[in-house]
Amino acid sequence: MRLPAYLIAASGLLLAIFIIFRVFVRRSYRTNGRLTPLSMLLEYVAILLWVVFASVNRPADWPVTHGGPVVILFGWILFAGGWIGFLASMVGLGIRRSHGLQADTLRRNGPYGLTRNPQIVAFMLAMLGYLVLWPTWRNAGSLLLMGLLAHAMVMTEEEHLANVFGPDYERYREQVPRYIPLRLGPKE
């Protein structure tokens, strides 16, 4: 895909992401207090659209990996470590909570004591490892789009959690960063 077509497709994907998360998912949280099956399906559609976008934009002459052994090792560590962290965070939070079906308690321990979104941080680390292993402008664009998709999802979820947990969530937001922990442990 040439750059103009890529930019048009990326813009369409961003618009779809915005509509899915900031309109449909947000409405579901506001009216039902959780995700409905339709809004959950739409979230998966948004992620699937990103996967298709990333896959379609893979160059035909794509190498298996790029760089020397240190770069390749670093890329695989990021990629594998990110996936492990993503799955561990999802299981640790619980599948129902991870999918927006249950919000009965506010998780603050484990990785949720370092960042409010360990699943997103870990997944982005995996995708960064993917970019290190296969450095193309298309993969860099896909990483950026995934970051925007994830941020739209996080903004919608945070709005919902603030409505559910009120001042307790506001204290948590003040103590724990949204994405990148700049220091270990919660504030005193």
Image (cartoon, rainbow, N blue to C red):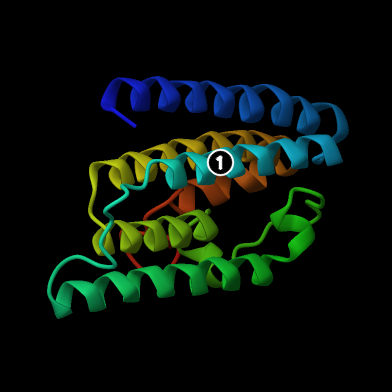
Q: Quadrant of the N terminus?
A: top left
x, y percent for residue 172: 56, 51
Q: Quadrant of residue 127?
A: bottom left
Q: Quadrant of the C terminus?
A: bottom left
Front one among 47 and 188: 47
> At 40% from the left edge and 19% from the top edge, which residue is drawn?
8
Q: Is residue 27 above or below residue 36?
A: above
> At 30% from the left edge and 20% from the top edge, which residue is drawn?
4
> At 38% from the left edge and 42% from the top edge, which residue is drawn?
142
Q: Amino acid at mark 1?
A: Val
Q: Is residue 153 left or right of residue 78?
A: right
Q: Is residue 162 left or right of residue 139?
A: right
Front one among 173 and 180: 180
Front one among 9 and 123: 9
Q: Residue furthest front?
A: 60
Q: Quadrant of residue 77?
A: bottom left
Q: Quadrant of residue 105?
A: bottom right
**Which residue carries the number 1 mark?**
154
Front one among 16 and 154: 16
